[in-house]
Image: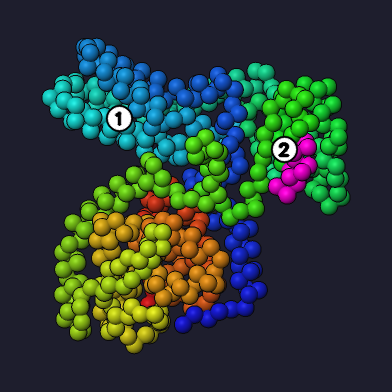
Amino acid sequence: MIKINNNSALQDHKKRAWKSRSESIHPIWVPIPSLHNVSSCTLDAPVITLIKRSLYPLVTIASLAGCYFSFGADFNHNFLSLAIVSFLLASHIFGEANLFRQEGQFPFFNALSFILLRWTLLLGCLWAMTLLIDPDIHFPQNPLLVWSVVTPMFLLVGALLVRRLLQNIATKGRRRKAIIIGANRLGNELLATINKDIYLAIDVHGFFDDRRDERMPTEIVDNIIGRMDQILAYIKENQIDLVYVSMPMHSYPRLLSLLQDLRDSTASVYFIPDMYLFDLINIRFDHVGGIPVVSVRDTPFLGLRGLIKRCYDVLFSSLILILISPLLALIAAGIKLSSHGPVLFKQRRYGLDGREIKVYKFRSMTVTEDGAHIKQATKDDRRVTPFGKFLRKTSLDELPQFINVLQGGMSVVGPRPHAVAHNETYRKIIDGYMIRHMVKPGITGWAQVNGLRGETDTLEKMAMRIEFDLEYIRNWSPLLDLWIVLKTIKVLFVSDSNAF
């Protein structure tokens, strides 16, 4: 039975969790969603955008041509077809080159993993297309083998060289002039982001706001250059190119009046919505039949990301089940010989989108509870069998869940599924609890490798687990999944006092 602490303790936890959100992800390559990541790349100069879009496709076919030339292979129609298809695939799979926009920032491991993941996908697509179109088509093996190995390094080196080139272009080219309307936290973050982003080539003159409150941060007060009624004259006098409006959403009448006034200028106008009003889960911009929409809460597994996640789950779980099949047989025999009852325990739990699934586990107790009220296992719980205690301590009781992964109800990595009875309890008392069901539950998760395994006997412990689950959804990447799997293996070899 959970112990519900007073509300102040829970609120203190939420404040600590929110404050440390950006610090809670340990792997340095996991991106934290921000205003910069969402929108700034759309304001690059056309020449910079063109170079970023064509970098990886051009390096791909240049590397292919170099490998053919080095081995003296014929540049026949097969080569031309391969080059064209490779160029088109690279354009789609790689997209714009991720050159890490801050001047001093280029995490090598992040860039290499970005390239390797997409390069592997490109090679897989080429192989599949060859089998489907003409399995008997002949390509020289040695040039293609070398091409598949050396191209990722060429792509990485090309990114480093082009990054420096683009920084020079942005520094020496024409710089655009901008102002920010609204001296507030959002406007100040926008100012800091623009000043750090060398590719934008934007000079912000300052803020316009009728307020000048002493409680404002000094960096905001010092940058206020005028009142709202002075904006239009300033734009015309200083030939301002860009106007950013960071006024709060509740100032709708003032906003309409301002936009009407700005019609008498040639400046581009951008409205910056205050997304901090929402609990953001994978923010992105989209459109429905031409109508713009903003996603403030969505699953990370859409399109290619969902395909990558599912392929990883199927391949990994299939391999694991093949390798551990003898172990599964031994555990089943141990359960049968040590206690009465079935080998597998099936329990109803909530899966993707809150739909019920049946999760498989090796039975570790003398009971198989699956009703409206379920008591969590506690230390020295008499319901746990001696062999079951060993299984729970080593997490071997979770192994049958790889079958759930193959069936599609679970993932290798994701928020751990809770019994339906526990879900119905916690969803009423923990804000945002059901958001964790926007992804498939996992055999292991971000919360579990951070020490939140086993019994959650207080509301604060469960709230901390949910906070980690939401962090995983916000920051998912294939590398984060790999990191969690590696940490899980480490945890299995370390005694955990929380696993009963």
User: On the picture, is 245 further left or further right than 417?
Assistant: right
Where residue 357 sits: x, y (%)?
32, 65
Which quadrant would residue 267 be assigned to in this image? Answer: top right
Q: Residues within 10 Å of mark 2 (few under 14, many from 20)?
A: many
Image point 81% across, 49% down: which residue? Answer: 216
User: On the picture, is 398 further left or further right than 201?
Assistant: left
- Residue 252 falls within the magenta-colored stretch: yes
Distance from label 1 to label 2 (Cα)?
A: 48 Å
Residue 7 makes an appearance in the image? yes
Where residue 392 sits: x, y (%)?
32, 74
Tell me the residue that label 2 is attached to.
Answer: 245
Image point 50% across, 69% down: which residue? Answer: 427
Tell me the residue that label 1 is attached to.
Answer: 149
Where residue 411 sits: x, y (%)?
34, 56
Relative to 438, does residue 360 appear above or below in the rendering? below
Magenta segment, which residues? 247-258
User: On the picture, is 110 further left or further right than 190?
Assistant: left
